[in-house]
Image: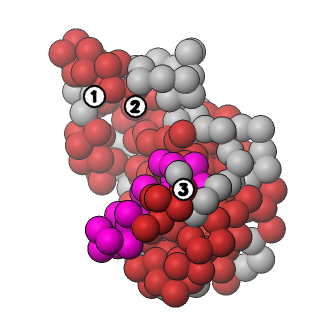
Amino acid sequence: MTQLTASSFLFRLQSLSSSIELEKTLRFFKTGKGQYSEDDMFIGVRMGAIFSLAKEYVDMPLFELEKLLQDPIHEARAGALSIMGKATPNKKMTAEKLKLFYEMYLRNHIHINNWDLVDMAAYKVVGRYLLDKPRTILYQLVKSKNMWERRTAIVSTWAFSKQGDTKDVFMLAEMLLQDKEDLLHKATGWMLRSAGSKDQKGLITFLDAHADVMPRTMLRYSLEKFPMKERMKYMKKNG
């Protein structure tokens, strides 16, 4: 029987590492400023293997999960966030436990220091928890000096837009128009595109108002589902 502990997970994780995969991982994450923390530690485990391992540990106790989330190894933190993401739709997930996940995610945000880590759990934990609650925290996070907290703010809105609730997506996206980070431009464009799948009129209104000042990457990502003629119209407006 699997011991649902952080140390057990780490032991299994180490057994899946390889020098070949480590080389690939470092190439992937070294693509520019802000892509990863200089003191981040990778051991070389495929994300698919991490996700498979996380399924076995989906019932890990919260105090063990928090240990894993604070581990210096990037893949260990990815495992913790994958577990959190997989646990939220589980029938065993109660409102009380989701609240504990939400609080744990936020108090450990210093350890959620890369785009992949944010994307694994932000909308599944933070967004899901806030579905029926005030979303003030997102408007605080979007003003943070920490780019990963800003990414959490916008990516969390995916939980809302999936249900046709797009107001916060557009409001937060507007607040990120002047952001300097390309990884925020990509995430915001992605969230705008997703919102447009449910609320095309809302997305068109947003683009008509802001396409000329949007970072080009943000605009391009937001337009991916538009017909070519419409895409070209907005890209030309952007100059």
- Can residue 176 be seen here? The reply is yes
Q: Is residue 184 left or right of residue 133?
A: left
Instruction: Return the residue nearer the eye: 40 or 195.
Output: 195
Label 3 to label 1, Cα distance in Å? Answer: 40 Å
Residue 230 in magenta? yes
* Furthest residue in direction left, as rendered: 20
Q: Is residue 230 left or right of residue 2?
A: right
Amino acid type, callout 3? Asn
Q: Residues within 10 Å of mark 3 (few under 14, many from 20)?
A: some
The boundaries of the magenta stretch are 214-232
Give above or below for 134 relative to 220: below
Which mark's residue is nearer the viewer, 3 or 1? 3
Secondary structure state at the residue bearing disc 2: helix
Q: Position of residue 219 (x, y in %)?
A: 50, 58
Q: Position of residue 115 (x, y in %)?
A: 49, 41
- Residue visible at 29% across and 47% down? 51
Q: Are marks 1 and 2 in contact (CB under 8 Å)?
A: yes
Residue behind mark 2:
75
Q: Residues within 10 Å of mark 2 (few under 14, many from 20)?
A: many
Label 3 to label 2, Cα distance in Å? Answer: 39 Å
Residue behind mark 1:
45
Residue behind mark 3:
238
